[in-house]
């Protein structure tokens, strides 16, 4: 009798739908399988072991909030320079540090990887080249000519960097051939780039984005006309969110000059949703103009051009946009006050968020003090999202 009961219990257990779901959950079955939404023409590759199956997320696929809007979290950093300065003799300071780090190519992102992976898009100013080409003959008198081995590109996608600006005064350090190889190297690695002649248009979580980049050196008279036209053209193409990057200003300046401020405002007036800048190797204040932000300079991020700059402070800018019915509305920003090195004694090219309040306050005070030179400086510089405090 007891044997019969045991057999019946076993049969009921095996046939029970609840038991089946529990067994499938242990095997990482997708919610689509459980709800039965696999189409008639869809098939599962039974030859692939479940332990090796991966889920590929399409970054262009819409992701809606409850109100039908789409929320984007974007991260922007300053100058990123790796590899060699071919104008210096001997092994470069970057290569020497790479040896100290036991050849770990990802070492510059050690203290930022988690931050950059916890967003929808990370953009940095790639100031240098990824090429084997030789020096640009027209720049042989320059103090700095930057070149990194193309294999070094792997550190970008491996650490959450999806996009770079290639409009700066070092992209031609190895000539046109070097720039062409740099672009191809980035493309092959799955990293997007944008320049003045190559605007970037792509879809992110269902939002059509447009990105433009410019160098302004001796170019303002031309750009005062061209930039607004380019912004309007992207809007006419249906871009719901437009970001414009400028490589501008003078090195070591802590606040923008009159031309920068004029250019930034004209760009916003033309329809851009955000302006970000770099080149001065110093942090600059942020302006709120007609409801949009102009981030005049993000300073350095990981910068292999100097083994100990006299100012190693910087910040990373993050902003959230809510996009609905083709209109992008900012949902606030934060900055991450940081040092460009994890080591206070010298620059090890590992940007590191500040932990001590006195260091954080130093960055905030510099930004607020220099913000007094702007017409519309932001009142505060939040350092944490409200839902993360």
Image (tube, rainbow, N blue to C red):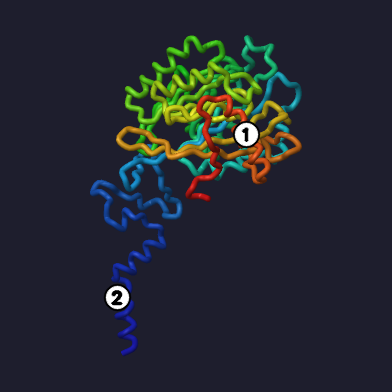
Image point (68%, 43%), residue name: 358
**In the shown orientation, is residue 75 left or right of residue 280?**
left
Q: For residue 12, which numbered disc appears in the image?
A: 2
Q: For residue 282, which numbered disc appears in the image?
A: none
Vertical side of 179 occupied by 96: above or below: below
The percent coordinates of residue 234 (x first, y second) are 37, 23
Q: In which image quadrant can residue 17 be found?
A: bottom left
The percent coordinates of residue 193 (x first, y second) are 48, 26
Image point (76%, 37%), residue name: 345
Q: In which image quadrant can residue 143 be found?
A: top right
- Whichever of labels 1 and 2 marks the residue nearer the N terminus, that label is 2
Image point (39%, 35%), residue name: 329
From the image, tell me which residue sits under label 1: 314
Real-space CA distance between mark 1 and mark 2, rounded to the nearest whole angstrom: 65 Å
Say which element carries label 2. helix
Q: Residue furthest bottom?
A: 1
Image point (58%, 15%), residue name: 175
Q: Nearer the viewer, residue 87 or 272?
A: 272
**In the shown orientation, is residue 255 left or right of residue 333?**
right
Q: In which quarter of the image is the N terminus?
A: bottom left
Could one spot residue 350 in this view of the protein?
no
**In the shown orientation, is residue 164 left or right of residue 203?**
right
Categorize mark 1 by other alpha carbons within 10 Å: few (<14), some (14-19), many (20+): many
């Amino acid at each position: 009798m007891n044997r019969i009961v045991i057999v019946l219990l076993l049969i009921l257990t095996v046939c029970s739908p609840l038991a089946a779901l529990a067994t499938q959950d242990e095997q990482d079955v997708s919610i689509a399988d459980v709800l039965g939404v696999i189409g008639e023409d869809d098939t599962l590759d039974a030859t692939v072991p479940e332990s090796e199956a991966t889920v590929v997320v399409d970054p262009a696929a819409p992701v809606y909030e409850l109100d039908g809007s789409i929320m984007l979290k974007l991260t922007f950093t300053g100058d990123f320079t790796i590899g060699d300065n071919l104008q210096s003799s001997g092994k470069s300071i970057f290569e020497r540090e790479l040896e100290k780090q036991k050849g770990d190519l990802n070492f510059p992102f050690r203290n930022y990887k988690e931050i950059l992976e916890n967003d929808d898009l990370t953009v940095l100013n790639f100031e240098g080249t990824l090429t084997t080409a030789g020096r640009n003959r027209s720049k042989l008198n320059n103090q700095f000519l930057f070149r990194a081995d193309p294999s070094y590109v792997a550190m970008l996608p491996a650490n959450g960097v999806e996009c770079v600006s290639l409009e700066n005064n070092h992209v031609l350090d190895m000539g046109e051939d070097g720039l062409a190889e740099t672009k191809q190297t980035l493309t092959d690695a799955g990293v997007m780039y944008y320049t003045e002649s190559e605007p970037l248009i792509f879809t992110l979580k269902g939002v059509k984005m447009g990105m433009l980049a410019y160098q302004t050196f001796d170019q303002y008279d031309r750009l005062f006309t061209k930039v607004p036209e380019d912004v309007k053209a992207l809007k006419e193409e249906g871009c719901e969110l437009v970001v414009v990057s400028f490589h501008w200003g003078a090195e070591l300046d802590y606040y923008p000059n009159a031309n920068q401020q004029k250019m930034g405002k004209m760009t916003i007036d033309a329809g851009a949703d955000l302006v970000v800048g770099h080149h001065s190797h110093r942090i600059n204040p942020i302006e709120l103009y007609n409801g949009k932000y102009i981030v005049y300079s993000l300073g350095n991020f990981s910068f292999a051009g100097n083994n100990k700059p006299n100012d190693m402070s910087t910040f990373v800018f993050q902003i959230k946009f809510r996009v609905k019915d083709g209109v992008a509305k900012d949902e606030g920003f934060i900055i991450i006050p940081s040092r460009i090195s994890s080591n206070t004694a010298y620059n090890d090219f590992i940007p590191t968020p500040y932990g001590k309040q006195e260091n954080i306050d130093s960055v905030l005070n510099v930004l607020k003090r220099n913000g007094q030179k702007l017409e519309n400086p932001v009142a505060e510089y939040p350092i944490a999202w409200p839902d993360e405090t």
